[in-house]
Amino acid sequence: MSLEIVILAAGQGTRMRSALPKVLHPVAGKSMLGHVIDCARQLQPQRIHVVIGHGAEVVQERLAAPDLNFVLQAEQLGTGHAVAQALPFIDAERVLILYGDVPLIEAETLQRLLQQVGPEQLALLTVRLDDPTGYGRILRNAAGVVQAIVEQKDASAEQRAIKEGNTGILAVPGKRLADWLGRLSNHNAQGEYYLTDVIAMAVADGLVVATEQPQDAMEVQGANDRLQLSQLERHYQQRAARRLMAQGVTLLDPDRFDLRGEVTVGRDVLIDVNVILEGRVVIEDGVQIGPNCVINNSTLRRGAIVKANSHLEGAELGEGADCGPFARLRPGARLGAKAHVGNFVELKNAVLGAGAKAGHLSYLGDAEIGARTNIGAGTITCNYDGANKFRTVLGEDVFIGSNSSLVAPLTLGDGATTGAGSTVTQDVPAKTLAVGRAKQRNIEGWKRPTKK
Ligand code: UD1
Ligand code: CA
């Protein structure tokens, strides 16, 4: 049966007190609406319609994709009115309604819901809550069959005592939708066209209303303010941490771990506290990550070690390679097997061959460094003349003396050496020593100046 999905995302979100539209606020580094869209995609619908209103331009600009149909709801006249805006574009046997500010909903829950919808049946996701304040309440008859939804503001005291709340998420037979939406009125406490009123209409038309519940109430929790946003964030992170531990990762403190993207992990990985993983991160078997590291779009091969306070972005550590503490690996930094980068070393677009070392206080940019080459403390590649960038190529087994300035473009052959403090401006052939510094003079009996 064909499926189209409508995501409601036109509301303002006043309580966020933000210039950013509510649905763009992030959970785990991705906008709430982005999470909902990704979940919708997992259901492989024919189309996804996103109803936008407040901040429509920004929302569309940020999330535009070929499989999304953005529909403008110029005035927010209610959830029923919002779905009606998408109606002219819909032609499916099943229509699923989602909310752009309910980001933790799981595809598995929606699959269960969708299994219940058919030409004569709609499916409603409900949730039992200790405190259902604010939610529409599910009205069932004596036999337990759903009859209607009543909104909090329209409910009697007796109805308000009902603990079963409407999540807002529902799946309906597409062919009926136009008729029901056309019959909605706004004669209610809020003067809005309530989508929830279609339940009573469906019942009157002789349809069955099936219900499903989420695995976990946080799946259907919306974020109306920053406190709720932080609760969604923590819940997401706890879920992510549990998943990683189940895959064989030791998290020294699962409450101090943040995933803001996607990670694949091997076995026996150890992650110390306050580590943030962003973008796409690949972590192979036996990798160890020290405390306070940020690792963005990087790959850590088997047995690699990232020591405390390192920042990696677009980097790759080869098998058994290590970096840090306080290493900064920028895009294009690649360490071969067992290569070593120590403290206060910055790499940008630089490749270190197997076993190469840069132990302390260096900047290596646009560089190719051969196997086993040793970069002395304080070495800088001068790769930029203010307009263009140039490459530095060092062969294998090169020894760069401490505090050398390597002025690119520059090539050093295998086994070449530079004296400490050299400014190297010319290529150095293999197995040759380059000394590019002022010669030392000693002045005997030199008298220091004294104060007048
Ligand atoms: C709605 C439900 C309520 C349910 C609750 C769950 C209705 C009438 N009520 O109430 O039964 O318990 O959600 O959170 O449906 N939106 C638009 N355009 C509009 C109005 C809303 O796009 O004109 C969007 C909002 O951006 C939001 C969602 O629809 O994502 C829900 O709107 P909201 O105002 O929060 O609905 P509630 O009154 O909380
Ligand atoms: Ca709401």
Image (tube, rainbow, N blue to C red):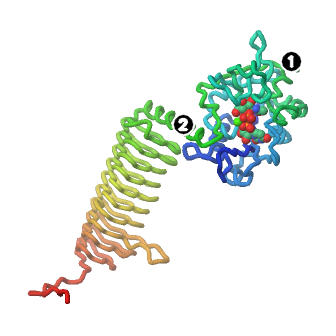
Residue appearing at x 33%, y 79% in the figure? 426
- Look at label 1 and name its amino acid: Gly
How far apart, in angstroms, are the residues tagged by discs 1 and 2? 40 Å
Which quarter of the picture shows residue 355?
bottom left
Residue at label 1? 206
Q: How would you rate the neighbour count of disc 2 (Cα within 10 Å): few for under 14, some for 14-19, many for 20 or more?
A: many
Residue at label 2? 236
Q: Nearer the viewer, residue 214 or 421?
A: 214
Q: Which of marks 1 and 2 is nearer the N terminus?
A: 1
- Quadrant of picture, ligand 2: top right
Side of 15 relative to 171 (left or right): left
Above or below, comparing residue 28 to residue 435 in the picture: above
Q: Nearer the viewer, residue 433 or 293?
A: 293
Side of 188 relative to 125 (left or right): right
- Look at label 2 and name its amino acid: Tyr
Q: In which quarter of the image is the N terminus?
A: top right
